[in-house]
């Protein structure tokens, strides 16, 4: 593969995978309102913790919203809320650690404060890498442990029902970005699903860059992830309303 072509691929991958910048800007008031449960719902039966993709505005992102809406339709009368991972999701990989730190701290806090809540971890593209790293049981080789968040304790895994990753960067993509590969922790591997669009170069060996933009609008892919999560919640495959990629709920 010649240098010009490698550079082109790297730039295109960076467009999709560029990681988070420091979360100093914070979330908008409306996002904070949706992220913080009311006093009567501080410990929901189910909570989706989702990290959006690169350049998406604060919140769940389009894929995360579609996924959460679809899953919500499957859990019946159970209380349900979401936590959008607080990180700006831009093109600065080093500060993607802020997303890992925020998500990990939230999951650990929920496991302690709401032990009966079943968490569903999820992410899209860069956010999927962030959430994948959250599950890792060890710091990647070559990374100074003092510079990254400490892996979560093994007991936390008992509070995570599933991990749903859309368009997660594979080893090839991470190599292009000169980043360590994402390693799902052994306690999370059996409860993890990776949803990858056909020929999406970010998560497959294909070269259809447009495929990476299809997750939010592809009902089948959203449904696949939600059905897996519902099954891990003990809801069977569930049935989502047909008609919208998100299962019929508004954004």
Image (cartoon, grey):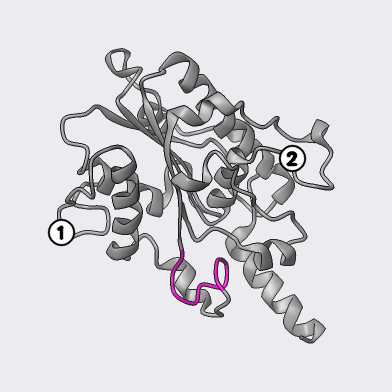
Residues shaded magenta: 196-204
Can you say whether 98 is above or below 175 in the image? Answer: above
What residue sits 51% from the left and 31% below the top?
157
What residue sits 70% from the left and 51% below the top?
92
In-image side of 33 versus 249 (left or right): right
Give the spatial CA distance, label 1 vs label 2: 42 Å
Can you say whether 99 is above or below 180 in the image? Answer: above
The percent position of residue 114, horizontal first and vertical second, equals 41, 17
View extreme (bottom): residue: 2
- Other-residue count near label 2 (Cα within 10 Å), few / some / many at <14 / 14–19 / ≥20: some
Pointers 1 and 2 in contact (CB under 8 A)?
no
**Residue 151's quadrant in the figure?**
top right
Residue behind mark 1? 242
- Total labels: the figure holds 2
In-image side of 146 versus 214 (left or right): right
From the viewer's side, name the closer residue of 151 and 251: 151
The percent position of residue 210, horizontal first and vertical second, equals 48, 75
């Amino acid at each position: 593969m010649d240098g010009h072509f490698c550079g082109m691929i790297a730039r295109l991958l960076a467009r999709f995978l560029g990681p988070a910048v420091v979360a100093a800007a914070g979330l908008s008031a409306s996002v904070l309102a949706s992220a913080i449960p009311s006093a009567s719902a501080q410990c929901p039966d189910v909570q989706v913790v989702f990290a959006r993709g690169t350049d998406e505005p604060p919140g769940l992102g389009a894929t995360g919203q579609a996924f959460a809406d679809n899953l919500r339709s499957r859990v019946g009368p159970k209380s349900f809320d979401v936590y959008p991972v607080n990180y700006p999701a831009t093109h600065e990989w080093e500060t993607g650690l802020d997303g890992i730190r925020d998500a990990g701290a939230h999951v650990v806090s929920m496991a302690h404060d709401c032990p009966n809540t079943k968490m569903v971890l999820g992410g899209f593209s860069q956010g999927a890498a962030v959430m994948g790293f959250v599950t890792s049981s060890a710091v990647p080789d070559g990374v100074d442990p003092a510079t990254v968040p400490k892996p979560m304790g093994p007991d936390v895994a008992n509070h995570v029902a599933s991990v749903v990753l859309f368009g997660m960067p594979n080893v090839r993509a991470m190599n292009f970005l000169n980043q360590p590969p994402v390693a799902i922790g052994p306690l999370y591997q059996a409860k993890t699903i990776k949803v990858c669009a056909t020929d999406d170069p970010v998560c497959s060996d294909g070269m259809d860059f447009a495929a990476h933009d299809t997750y939010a609008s592809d009902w089948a892919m959203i449904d696949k992830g939600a059905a897996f999560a519902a099954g891990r919640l003990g809801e069977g495959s569930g049935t989502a309303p047909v008609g919208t990629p998100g299962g019929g709920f508004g954004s």
